[in-house]
Image (spheres, helix red, strand yellow):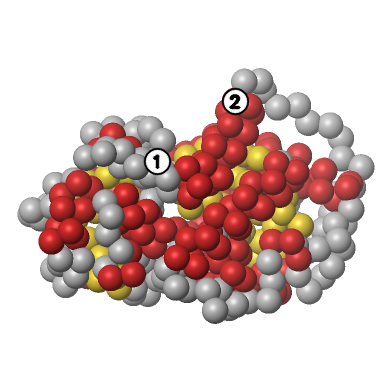
């Protein structure tokens, strides 16, 4: 298959993050004594229920801080609803207060682009990018679909021939991956048979039950089933193969030039001072370099990534424009 260069829709997402992440792996971080520190309990706000991905991120941070005695008075607050919008709105109610942070994902951008939330990343204080979760394509072990190229071939014959779950919502990173693969083969992504369920767990159950043909999810949702042999991952949208699943080829290796991840960001209310930002940058840099954090990433087949505030702002600006362009193409912007 011809390799289609989709740089306008992939470079902003990948290059800035990967180059910045690499810069932090060259030397061990040094940590100065902060000029500001919390004076009361800190809230880690997550937009998912207990056990969800954002909740796990928040509780892993909380555990590391408490056990390392870096920040012992921190609690996780679950604010579920609106694809994260409720959590971001709640966090932003305390302008200038460094005692409330939130775990954010792509919905912080896409909800605003689609008019589902008045809040944008520019209305908050982006603190740091702390992880990246490459998206993947997975089928049942007995599926006749063996690769991403097989998928495109089937789409060309009939765009409705493969039913695919995107997880819990359209206009998400999973939707973007499917759209970019379709575009690479000259297939209109608006004509595909795409479904949504309550989340990754529901999608996985429906795939195992034979109700759908494929799921497009972060690898952490399916890696157990892949290792057990009940599912087969046909491709991962990372720049290189995952250490946890070395036999799974990347989408790029299959002749489709697409890299698509789902980053994890820590944000705070608008109006934080330079000293408050420096405190959180310092703490989060120590956190992502902690063995417990790296072990958690490995469990979820996620990738290590760290960017401080200014690099994160630059990345988000490019990401916002990239996501908007694709959402317009998908007819999802009013």
Circle count: 2
Quadrant (top left/top right/bottom left/bottom right) for the C terminus: bottom right
Q: Residue shown at 60%/77% (left/top)?
A: 115
Residue 281 lies in quadrant: top right
The answer for how far apart the CA atoms under marks 2 and 1 are is: 28 Å
Q: Nearer the viewer, residue 200 or 309?
A: 309
Circle number at residue 25: 2
Q: Is residue 100 visible?
A: no
Element under disc 1 = loop
Picture residue at 66% right of the left edge, 20% below the top: 27
- Vertical arrangement, residue 316 with respect to residue 107, above or below: above
Q: Earlier in the sequence, mark 2 or mark 1?
A: 1
Instruction: Specify few, some or many for label 1: CA neighbours under 10 Å numbering under 14, 14-19, or 20 or more.
Output: few
Q: Residues within 10 Å of mark 2 (few under 14, many from 20)?
A: few
Q: Residue 5, labelled with which disc?
A: 1
Q: Is 179 left or right of 44, judged from the image as shown?
A: left
Residue 62, given in percent of the width and then of the height, sits at 63, 53
Q: Secondary structure at mark 2?
A: helix
Q: Residue 139: where, in percent of width, then height?
A: 19, 55
Q: Is residue 49 left or right of residue 222?
A: right
Q: Name the residue: 84% across, 68% down.
A: 95
């Amino acid at each position: 298959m011809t390799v289609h260069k989709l740089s306008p829709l992939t470079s902003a997402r990948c290059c800035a993050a990967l180059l910045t992440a690499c810069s932090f792996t060259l030397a061990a971080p040094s940590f100065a004594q902060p000029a500001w520190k919390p004076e009361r309990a800190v809230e880690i706000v997550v937009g998912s229920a207990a056990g969800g991905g954002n909740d796990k991120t928040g509780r892993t941070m909380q555990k590391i801080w408490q056990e390392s005695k870096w920040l012992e008075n921190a609690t996780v607050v679950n604010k579920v609803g609106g694809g994260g919008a409720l959590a971001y709105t709640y966090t932003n109610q305390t302008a200038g207060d460094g005692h409330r942070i939130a775990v954010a994902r792509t919905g912080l951008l896409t909800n605003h682009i689609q008019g589902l939330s008045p809040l944008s990343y520019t209305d908050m204080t982006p603190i740091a990018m702390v992880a990246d979760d490459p998206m993947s394509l997975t089928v049942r072990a007995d599926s006749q679909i063996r690769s991403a190229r097989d998928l495109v071939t089937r789409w060309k014959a009939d765009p409705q021939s493969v039913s695919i779950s995107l997880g819990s919502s359209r206009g998400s990173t999973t939707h973007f991956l499917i759209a970019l693969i379709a575009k690479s083969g000259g297939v209109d992504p608006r004509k595909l048979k795409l479904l949504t369920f309550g989340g990754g767990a529901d999608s996985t159950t429906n795939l195992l039950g034979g109700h759908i043909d494929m799921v497009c999810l972060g690898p952490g949702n399916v890696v157990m089933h892949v290792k057990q042999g009940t599912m087969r991952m046909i491709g991962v949208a990372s720049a290189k193969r995952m250490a946890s699943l070395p036999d799974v080829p990347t989408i790029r290796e299959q002749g489709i030039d697409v890299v698509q991840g789902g980053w994890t960001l820590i944000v705070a209310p608008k109006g934080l001072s330079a000293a408050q930002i420096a405190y959180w940058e310092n703490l989060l840099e120590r956190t992502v370099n902690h063995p417990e954090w790296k072990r958690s990433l490995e469990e979820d087949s996620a990738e290590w990534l760290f960017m401080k505030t200014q690099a994160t702002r630059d990345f988000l600006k490019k990401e916002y424009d990239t996501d908007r362009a694709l959402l317009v193409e998908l007819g999802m912007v009013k």
